[in-house]
Amino acid sequence: MGRLFGTDGVRGIANEELTPLMAMQLGQAGAYVLTRQNQHKPTIMVGCDTRISGDMLANALMAGVCSVGANAVYVGIIPTPAVAYLTRKYKVDAGVVISASHNPVEFNGIKFFDGEGYKLPDELEDEIEGLIRNNMAGVKFPTGASVGKIKYRNDAREEYINHAVQSVPVDLTGMKIVVDCAEGASYYTSVEALKELGGQIIAIHNNPDGTNINANCGSTHMEELQARVVFEKANLGLAFDGDADRLLAVDEQGHMVDGDQIMAIVGHHMRSQGKLKKNTIVATVMSNLGFFLMGKKEGLHIEQTKVGDRYVLERMKEIDASLGGEQSGHVIFLEENTTGDGLLSALHLLQVVVETGKPLSELAGIMTVLPQALVNARVPNHKKENYMDYPEIARAIRELEEKFAGEGRVLIRPSGTEPKVRVMIEGKDQTEIEKEARKLADLIQNTML
């Protein structure tokens, strides 16, 4: 069996791979590991996105938390970044989010934040995993008055909205904005925050029923939003994912603006106001080559990390950077929150549009997005890290790297959250790189089945 934790917590098909028993065990082990140094009765905050399995898994996890003598505070359906922020604000000992982010409804996940609102380092995750594999050996289960209890709070999402609008108090009067909530956790918070700031909001996919999260909507399916922005003659469109920790945008002409472009636009504006610490943006190796060329041209220093917003965050903390993120739309404003935050990203982007008076299409021209092809090879989850062990795959990758040397990039990596190996190629000719990426992905998929 492979490692339980991926790059973004524990993920799997709910009730098949991620079972209520597993959720309970994660609650027990997580509460024990994260609070064992405490002299007081510890408290864990728990929130979830809109998927139907959230109730099942949240209640199982909270039962586990209570069984080791910790209390739980359940804040219900709420964005992931809200849990990160509120964990610190309420001074609880840890936070947990039940969410599979941008994945389809059948998936779910469990991710932990420490008392400061940060995702856990690998060592702590390994400790939690070790306790589960050893059947909680050495852990005492209290009885009587020492068992934990659950408190329910309905005001948490309002606190998060207040934090966001106070952090970026942009006046949106006269702005017409289409917002795609992905039938997810932002269905209330994003719409209410933008309305509070004066925007004329047209909300789509904001009627979650537990089964429609991310279904042909949100940041992974932008087509409807693009068409709606043009139809409505809106200033721009905003697309969140299921747990609202990422944001992509659409300009007034219907063109997508991705995480790299958002970081370029906002980073350049922050630098002009003296607010970009160390003149630095932290990004991953998957950022478009055009983003790095923009950095050179504009005099912005771009730090590179492994793929995964946790690695972006680690580097930001190491060098005391204020802005970092991923092409996929996870953007971290470290002075305002400890994780990717779709609502804060939206407000910062809107602030640049308002303060410069320029349309988003013009602002996005700060960088040229070079042709990029990304194709996923579906492989068994336990094999995905070992693709280079297959000689024919290793040979094909070497040949591609030689072919595109000097005028493009080839990047192959296993997904941290799904049973996939991702093939990314950048080059001058979109048709050619798509053909080569598909060819390599097919080889990986067929070889590793």
Image (cartoon, grey):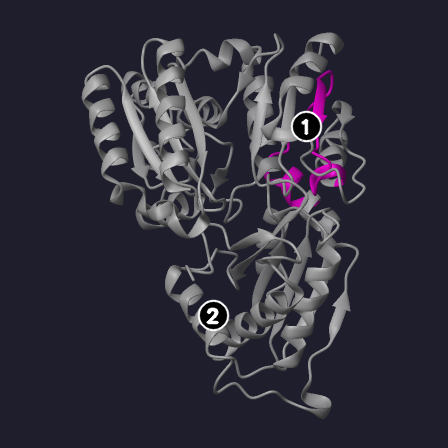
Image quadrant where one finds the C terminus: top left
Quadrant hosting residue 420: top left
Q: Crowdedness of circle 2 by 10 Å Cα count: few (<14), some, many (20+)?
A: many
Question: In the image, residue 319 lies at what x, y percent?
Answer: 31, 46
**Residue at (25, 45) in percent of width and height:** 389
Packing grade of label 1 (10 A; few <14, some 14-19, many >=20) is: some
Name the secondary structure under disc 1: loop
What is the three-letter code of the residue carrying label 1? Answer: Asn
Give whichever of 72, 110 is nearer the camera.
110
Task: Tell me the residue at 77%/61% (across/down).
Answer: 153
Is residue 449 shown above or below 397?
Answer: below
Q: Residue at x 57, y 59 (%)?
A: 88
Q: Which amino acid does label 2 sit on?
A: Ile
| Residue pictured at 29% horizontal, 16% vertical | 297
**Distance from the alpha carbon under mark 2 to that under mark 1:** 35 Å
- Which is nearer the N-term, disc 2 or disc 1? 2
The circle on residue 301 is none
Q: Does the magenta stretch include residue 161?
A: no
The residue to which callout 2 is attached is 128
Q: Disc 1 designates what residue?
A: 216
Observer able to see residue 422: yes
Segment colored magenta: 162-188
Vertical placement of residue 55 versus 320, above or below: below
Q: Measured from the top left, where is residue 118 in percent x and y? A: 48, 56
Residue 92 in view of the camera: no
Give left or right: position of 197 versus 99: right
Q: Position of residue 100 (x, y in %)?
A: 60, 47
Q: In which quarter of the image is residue 346?
A: top right
